[in-house]
Amino acid sequence: MNQEDFNYWLNMGNNENANAPQKSIVTNQTPAASQGGWANTDDYTQAREVVNRIVQAHIDLTDDYNDWFRIASALANGFGETGRDLFHEVSRMSSKYDAAECDKKYDNCLRTGNGSITKATFYQMARDAGVDIRTSRPQQEVVAKVASSHTYTETSQKDNSLIINKDMKEKTPKDACDIATTATNRFPTFSDKIASEDWCGYLQPVQECMNDAQSKDKMTLSVINTISGAIPNYYAIYDERVIYPPLYFLFCGKAASRKGEIGLALKVLKALKREIQKAYHAEMEAYEQAHALWESKSSKAERGERGPEPKEPKYRSPIMAANSSYAVFISDLKANDGWGVMFDTEADNVSQMLKTDYGDYSTLLRQAPHHEPICYNRVRDNIHIEIEEPRLAVCLTCTPDQLPALFPTILNGLGSRFLFYNLNREVKWRSPFQRKEKTNEQLFEELGERYLELHHMMQELGDRRIQFLLPESLQERFDQYFEEMLQDQFYMLGDGIVSFIFRMGLYFIRITMVLALLRRFSDLAPGKPLFEAHEQAITCSETDFRIAMTIMDTLVNHTAYIYSGLGGEKEEDIFDHPVNLSPEELRLFKALPDDYTTGEAKKKAEEIGINPATAKRYIGDYWKKYHIVERVNHGHYRKINLKK
């Protein structure tokens, strides 16, 4: 039971002090699972008593959809499956009651609830309707001891979700470890909800080599993510546009949450990288020989015959280094025909690049998921690079305190380009001496060799492209699924979450694209082609659709949790119309007064660590590009279109 719920429990025994501030408290009970099939008996008994009073008074709390949804979320998050009967009884008070619709809504809340609406919301709604929610039991049986009696100190680690009290001290070390593990493992997983035999043959070894659901989740997602950025000749039609498989994933976890294991997924591209670099070195050797011969023809007569100077081949790799300069990164992506994987286990490298003065990583990362053309021009250096359809996958890991630097604002949409997975930190010793028939490194390298075979099969198609199709029956389920998700998350988190949900629909299709292709490859008989000569498309199976839906059920919880931390500032709080500022542009804009000169802006830029030359460019864009300032006269600007 969380702090908010306990404050309500304290209030129940004394309505006169219902709004009085409460002392912090601790409980000796194990927290209830938000989606589990059990709940604390005392809590449930109290909720049952409140529901009985609602029914006896014939009070309708659910006539409004928003209220109905909030009660479903509160009971699902607070009591899991055991709260279903309570939800039905409260809903029966409305003339709109429909048992099937109630079950459907409750199932959805069990599946997608992120814990932001607690059972305290239900009690408050009942109280507002005039229901007496005070417990009939003595208060000392309901409320744990107040803070003055527990051993938590100001120097304790407050952020590890574990409150130490007298009863825990009296438990055995194993009991304490079990409680610690329960307290920290609060984010949902999907691998424990999918039958092992349902995974395609390629992904089954990933599931089998990991010991727990979270490890299975993170490695399966990171493999899908990595492969998504390296599949040629494969597309789908989504919202009347051509899309390709690349995904953006960010894994967030505290120290010791085993984020580093995600780096194993890079080995899936090891064989492909080795092959590409072998070809590059062969081209480089041929170039050096041709260039040496070209230079040897130095006489006046020979220079007229030697032709144009040989061009040096561009370095190529499927892995894009996140800590490269923008110019190098865009050049490497171009050399690789616009596709690749940005993979980094230190998100600080990307955060640093987002602050670069030359080029705009943020713009690149925002445009690439939608395959929007990327242009890079430097007249002084005679450089012109254009990538018509970038197909970039991104896989990053970070700690919670690195998130603000990576996403200093949600206004520019960079955060909504990512799918998020939060890593639980298990407070449990893991023996480093376990023996396996194969090490994880060997297993993932073998997956890399198998993927190279799949990559070759796709390359051999030449100009022929394979389309991914979702059958009409699954299209209807897709639309219904995301309509419910959109409405539910909007009611819980407001307008800012909408763009995240829209892109989750896009990423759902991309995940199913990868799953469908890997299943086709896994089921392929020896010696058979991946696609027959007449085949132009691959169709999503019911199994892969259900797997993707189960994955998304989990990811919407994780993403909503991250959004709640990022989304304190909304676009409508600052501007009257949508703008697309980079984090650096927004930071300077917010630091400037409503009325300023160019000189004042440059000085302010230096104070907050922005290059004055860059600041000058930003000042011009505020006026000419974004129209969020007006020019009073030369070198003098005033902010406009601000919310007053």
Image: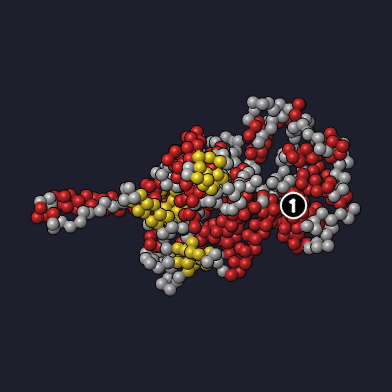
Residue plotted at (31% across, 51% down) = 382
Element assignment for label 1: helix
Q: Amino acid at mark 1?
A: Arg
Apparent side of residue 75 relative to residue 300 in the rendered image (left or right): right
Apparent side of residue 83 relative to residue 564 in the rendered image (left or right): right
Residue plotted at (78% across, 57% down) = 64
- Percent across and percent down for residue 214 are 58, 46
- Percent across and percent down for residue 324 are 40, 43
Of the 4 image quadrants, the one containing the N terminus is top right
Position above or below: 392 against 475:
above
Q: Say how many tags the image has.
A: 1
Dividing the picture into quadrants, the one containing residue 255 is top right
- Label 1 Cα crowd, 10 Å radius (few <14 / some 14-19 / many 20+): many
- Percent across and percent down for residue 286 are 23, 53
Residue plotted at (56% across, 39% down) = 593
606 and 65: which one is in front? 606
- Percent across and percent down for residue 119 are 76, 46
Q: Residue furthest front?
A: 633
Residue 84 visible in the shown view: no
Instruction: Look at mark 1 in the image and give the residue it sits on.
Output: 70
Residue plotted at (45% across, 70% down) = 536
Residue 116 visible in the shown view: yes
Q: Residue furthest bottom?
A: 534
Q: How is the image coloured?
A: secondary structure
Q: Residue furthest right?
A: 56
Position above or below: 301 against 43:
below
